[in-house]
Amino acid sequence: MQIGLRNMPAISKKRRRRRMTLVALARRKIQQFGPYKSLALLFVPLLIVEPLKIAGVAFAGLGHWVAGACMIVGAYAVGLLAVDRLFRVVKSKLLTMKWFAALGKIWDEARSRASDWINFRRTGTL
């Protein structure tokens, strides 16, 4: 009987790589875009959602208040979620543009000041 490496059982099985999901594949393709193409991509959900909001107002104007309000709220939600998800994917590319990085810095400072002010009003301490 021979004792050696050939007769020993494998410690772990080889893991099979699963195929990428459609979302992961799209995210990888979008991350390869340049900064201006990424900026243009952020406007696509806005171009789709804004007419839906106007249609919701028109629908409410025809007397269908509940359906119009639901359409407006749904359009806001879809737009917010789509733009937020896209922005998280393309943010690093957008920050390579100097003017966008400067605006981002101003936005972050304003948000920080507002947060500090809210915390001061709530607790009374800095």
Image (spheres, helix red, strand yellow):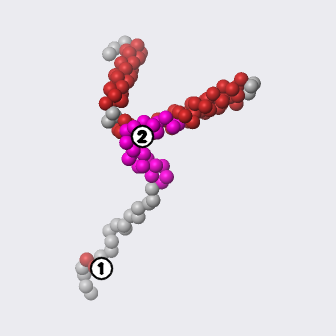
- Residue 99 drawn at (x, y percent): 34, 28
Q: Quadrant of the C terminus?
A: top left
* Cβ atoms at labels 2 and 1 below 8 Å apart: no
Residue 30 visible: yes
Q: 78 or 38, which lies in front?
A: 38
- Magenta residues, dominant SS class: helix
Residue at the limit of the structure toward the right, as seen here? 63
| Extent of the magenta region | 21-45
Q: Which mark is residue 70?
A: none
Crowding near the residue tagged with mark 2, few <14, some 14–19, many ≥20 C-alpha atoms within 10 Å = some
- Residue 95 drawn at (x, y percent): 34, 34
Q: Nearer the viewer, mark 2 or mark 1?
A: 2
- 42 falls in the magenta region: yes
Q: Which residue is mark 2?
A: 37
Q: Which residue is mark 1?
A: 7
Crowding near the residue tagged with mark 1, few <14, some 14–19, many ≥20 C-alpha atoms within 10 Å = few
- Residue 96 drawn at (x, y percent): 32, 36
Under mark 2, the amino acid is Lys
SS of the residue under disc 2: helix
Q: CA distance from mark 2 to mark 1?
A: 57 Å
Q: 66 or 115, which lies in front?
A: 66
- 84 falls in the magenta region: no
Q: Say which residue appears at 42% left-offset and 49% top-offset.
A: 29
SS of the residue under disc 1: helix
In the displayed structure image, the side of residue 60 where residue 32 appears, left or right: left
Under mark 1, the amino acid is Asn
In the displayed structure image, the side of residue 72 where residue 65 appears, left or right: right
- Residue 103 drawn at (x, y percent): 36, 25
Q: Quadrant of the N terminus?
A: bottom left
